[in-house]
Image: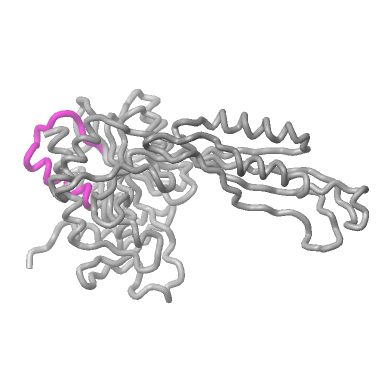
Amino acid sequence: MKKCPILTFAKDLIRRKSITPEDAGCQLLMIARLKKLGFKIEIMNFKNTNNFWARRGKDSPLFAFAGHTDVVPSGPLKQWNTPPFKPIIIDGKLYGRGASDMKGALACMIISVEQFLTKYPNHKGSIAFLITSDEEGEFINGTTRVVTTLMERNEKIDMCIVGEPSSSHQVGDIIKNGRRGSITGNLYIKGTQGHVAYPNLANNPIHQSLPVLNEFINTQWDNGNCFFPPTSFQISNLHSGARTPNIIPGELDIQFNFRFSTELTDKKIKQRIYSILDKHNLNYNLKWTLSGQPFLTSKGQLLEAVSKAIHEINHKKPKLLTTGGTSDGRFIAKMKGQIIELGLINTSIHKANENVNVADLTKLTNMYRKTLEKLLG
């Protein structure tokens, strides 16, 4: 029986225990194959994070595949039917941590480029890979640092496919053509501790916060647009007091998060939050963490090429969605290029017994290759 190069490579990646921010040799496997194809390799490691930038060609447009070799921890081994880092095929499915998110897609990227270059060795433009080992973690020394380095030397990615598992029921049924921004607020409200029997001698920060939180919750931050739902506000954590029934607490910690559309900016969010807080005369301190700005690819060559490639294989058009969490696309978006996410089915990601249909690896590889042919062939 003839070996499938996509499956073989996916297995090679899965058996390496590359839990964030470890790479465990995955990138060396990719680099070895890319070198044989004529890619110039640049290792861009920052602190404990492995990254590489590989480019073939000097002309524009520059098309890039972006992805990560790190995976989330396996979790309790007793919940797995097979060892998480020992790739096994059962009933046509490949099991192992990273099978869908996203070592399977990395194998598809590499093999699709090999196939493309066999047919188009003198292709138009340039092809690149931007690979990190810090997508599932703190995202401090990964893609964002590579992007900053590239921008400092005026190198721009014109079109990029991020291989995150975007598909829902069938590979290619969904293209993520954008993502919402994410900003978290850590709000500290200062009160005065006291005995519950003497509230006139204390100042309860929980009581102070309720009208404010009610206003946050009931504010219509925006109406969204044809690509994004309205911006959402969610309280993720509340902490106050010492769990003692006869003490009025003296402080309250509140953590909240916004997932915001392109109709809003982090600056406007902050302004409105401060306005509400100041209106209620609270003694507070507020610290912000911006995880990413929203980005959107509403049209362009990349979206057209990917959509056509998917239609040729699935015989139906993919849906365009911006739902879900953030991805490293938010960092690449700083270059103002066209960005979409296209990967495997996401139903088993981050779960025990993560898996991918073996046939889907071939299907995704063909979608990637056809996209390259339409853009650079």
Residue 335, how many percent across, how many down? Answer: 36, 28
Tell me if 117 is positioned left or right of 68 in this view: left
Residue depicted at x 32% and y 53%: 102
Name above or below for residue 74 compared with residue 298.
below
Residue sitting at the far top = 154
Residue 186, how many percent across, how many down? Answer: 64, 43
Q: Which residues are magenta?
A: 108-128
Towards the viewer: 367 or 176: 176
Inspect the magenta stretch and tell me whether residue 178 lies in it: no
Image quarter of the C terminus: top left
Figure disc tally: 0
Name above or below for residue 85 compared with residue 177.
below
Q: Is residue 56 visible?
A: yes
Tell me if 3 is positioned left or right of 209 in this view: left
Towards the viewer: 231 or 19: 231
Residue 200, how many percent across, how many down? Answer: 92, 48
Residue depicted at x 67% and y 48%: 254
Residue depicted at x 12% and y 42%: 116
